[in-house]
Image (cartoon, rainbow, N blue to C red):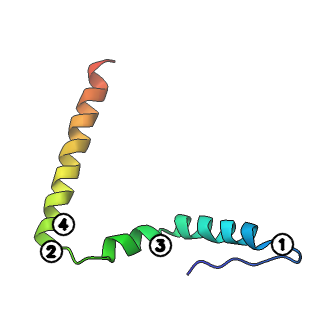
Amino acid sequence: MAMVKIKDGESFESAFRKFKKSCEKAGILSEVKKRENFEKPSVRLKKKSIAARKRAVKKSRKGWND
């Protein structure tokens, strides 16, 4: 859980900014978006393999110009 301690005289905007930053660091929003709709395990596995393939292609291209 993201928590922010507010100092005396601190504005709401700055406290809210700190809260948003702590949520982003904790990965709360990405987790919520990921869990918004159910994803079948087969679909999850397929996405994972596609991402791995993309990383491999990108890595092989990176070494091509060197």
Q: Write down the residue under mark 4.
A: 44
Q: What residue type is labelled 1?
A: Glu
In percent of the image, x 59 and y 77: which residue is there?
A: 2
Along the polypeptide, which appears first: circle 3 or circle 4? Answer: 3
Disc 3 from disc 2: Cα separation: 21 Å
Q: Write down the residue under mark 2.
A: 40
Q: What residue type is labelled 2?
A: Lys
The numbered mark at residue 28 is 3
Q: What residue type is labelled 4?
A: Arg
Cβ–Cβ under 8 Å for marks 2 and 4: yes
Along the polypeptide, which appears first: circle 3 or circle 1? Answer: 1
Q: Nearer the viewer, residue 66 or 2?
A: 2
The numbered mark at residue 38 is none
Q: Which of 47 and 16 is in front in this view?
A: 16
In percent of the image, x 80 and y 71: which residue is there?
A: 11
Disc 1 from disc 4: Cα separation: 43 Å
